[in-house]
Image (cartoon, helix red, strand yellow):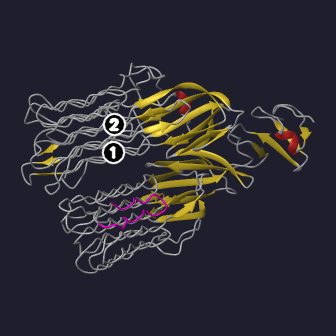
Amino acid sequence: MGFVAANAVGVGTTTTTGRNAGVGTATGTIIYNSTLNEVQVYKGNALGWTNIGESFIEATGGTISDYTESGTAFRAHVFTSSGTFSVTKAPSNANTVEYLVVAGGGGGGSCNSSDGGGGGGGAGAVRYATGFSVSATPGSYTVTVGAGGNGDRSPGQTSHGIAGSNSVFGPITSTGGGGGGSTRDPSSHPAGGSTGGCGSDLAPNTAATASGSPGGTDGSSSPVSGWGNPGGSNATGSAGAGGGGAGAAGSQASAPPHPSPGGPGGNGLSYSITGITTHYAGGGGGGAYNGNPGPAGSGGLGGGGAGGKGVDGPEATFSTGGGGGGGGMIPGNSKNGGNGGSGIVVVRYPIGGLAATAKATGGLISFYNNKTIHTFTSAGTFTASASFSETVEYVVIGAGGGGGGTNGSAHVGGGGGGAGNYKTGTTPVSGPFAAPVSIGAGGGFGNGTNVAPVSVGSAGGTTTLGFPSPISSVGGAGGGHGASTGPSNTSGSGGGGGYPNRAGGPTSGAPFPGTIGATPPAGFAHAGGNGYNPEGGAGGGGGAGGAGSVGTGPGPNYGGGPGGFGIQLPSTFRNPQSTVGAPGPTSPPVSGADTSGKYYVAGGGGAGLLQGLPGSAGVGGGAGGPYAGAGSGSSGPITTPGGFALENTGSGGGGGVRQYPSPDQGSPGGNGGSGIVLIAYPS
């Protein structure tokens, strides 16, 4: 069996079996395949063998996943945060893609101290189709990933969870899920792709009509309205009803007599467009009274948060579009609804030939610069057989903390949330093993209204790569509220401090030495910035690349401090076809960084503004930003929360704004960004 290099005169002949046995391992090798009667060229690890004359779409954006399905190689671009799908080549005979667009889920309803439970949030609508034509002129398709709606945090009020935000791919829009009804809420719930369930009440309530269409099945193409269903209605005195999911309606809670369990959320729909079959857009479960034996409602398949039983409703899973869980009653104690899950956008197309075979499985798999890269944006398992023996390079980042809130008595804007701990290095590993991977969820925002008590942001979750010697990175601390000390969370970056002269949160993480490379065992993290001394604005959250900045002052200049700088990922993971991470500086003042202005992670959240006096809000991720996907502080109006950090960056959320002197009120902070795990080894 013969083969020749691409620049030779002749072309060698072999069978498919001979080709797959090792013929042509160098990019550019050409053979004549006598099995298929076709001339083929080897285009490298990602594209494999391609017939001469064939041409396929070439594009950049999102996280890349290359895989083979039913004998065809596909490339999926997975967007867990907003960006751009940029087409550089779209031949007329192969210029169509398929897409999945899932909007953000609605927040769960709250429960006051004498009712059964809040309703679960509705899931974001799901739009899926094949045969969507793209073009290289102009070639840029805006991708917006909708944020999950906040759970209701004003128990006892006539209110409800907040609707999720829309997700967009070019001209395609998917509608966010409606919020769940809070207890004693007779008003219409927010409209949405799927709508939220009703909360407990003294009279029957009927859930709002969904804008999405019922009847979807797993993997099915959707109508223009997307797939969506209504939440459950409520009988008199029952617990909270479940929110609607993309595949099924939410369920009504059982009516008294006790026990009165909460209604389950409707299930979502599953798709394999990323190469991993996954459920999306499950409805949130309804909350329940902790004194009854009946359970709270379960969350629907697809990331729906379960209802709370005597506790706050859990948050939905990020990047699924699931609805948040409803809060559950405990006598004398009101409970909040959980936040809805952020959405996701996926675009895929065939790339010809067969995708390269990875030596291990798990996560989104791509190939760059003779390395195989596994990217985990959600929980999974990194699995290898007994033949696997490699020195792997890894990045493990904890989730960012939420920004602090503020109100009319908290003096200044809220402090920025701290970034998750950042660890990278190399380690030899041998199979067989099945290493579990968990991805920390971003910390929740701090309250900032005149109804709910003002609060600090919550810490981000821990991210773990479960090798035989597990590698864990804790989340960043939440930002301080307008009058508190910045919180800390061991080796995560600290939260920003508030007024007057409140200290930023400390950290036990190691300082960044100024050169991108392997971290010490403690990982990189920095303290949050102080509130200005003697009085001034709140401090920014710490980042993996630097400390949060002090707020501006002296009074009456009450500007927020910028968050700490993030870090650019190691060069191994800077695939130009992918946009893992977020924008950063194009002239970085550190060694080992490039000037692309891409691939930045783990920045601190900026502090919010005291509106009405001189000053400005702090930007996320360092002066000159926003960088690294960190949330910037809110500059108003009071209906505007602190900026949400981008998912899968580990960056902190921005602090809330205080408006002064009239109305003397404040806003909540923004949520932190979830963590991420990256693994690479020679292909």
**Closest to the observer, 259 or 161:** 259
What label sits on residue 196 in the rendered view?
none
Tag count:
2
Relative height, residue 119 to residue 477 (above, below): below
Q: Which residues are magenta?
A: 292-308
Relative height, residue 326 to residue 256 (above, below): above
Q: Is residue 594 left or right of residue 204?
A: right
Closer to the chain start, of discs 1 and 2, is 1
Q: Is residue 208 left or right of residue 351?
A: left
Q: Give the main secondary structure, helix, strand or loop, of the magenta stretch.
A: loop
Q: Position of residue 13 (x, y in %)?
A: 91, 40
Tell me what residue is drawn at x 48 percent, y 67 percent.
246
Q: Is residue 131 left or right of residue 245?
A: right
**Closest to the observer, 665 or 82:** 665
Secondary structure of residue under mark 1: loop
The C terminus, quarter of image: top right
How crowded pointer 2 is (Cα within 10 Å; few <14, some 14-19, many 20+) is rated as many
Q: Position of residue 516 (x, y in %)?
A: 46, 23
**Which three-letter amino acid code belongs to the residue tagged 1?**
Gly
**Closest to the observer, 422 or 516:** 422
Would you name the residue on which mark 1 appears?
Answer: 443
Q: Are marks 1 and 2 in contact (CB under 8 Å)?
A: yes
Would you name the residue on which mark 2 appears?
Answer: 476
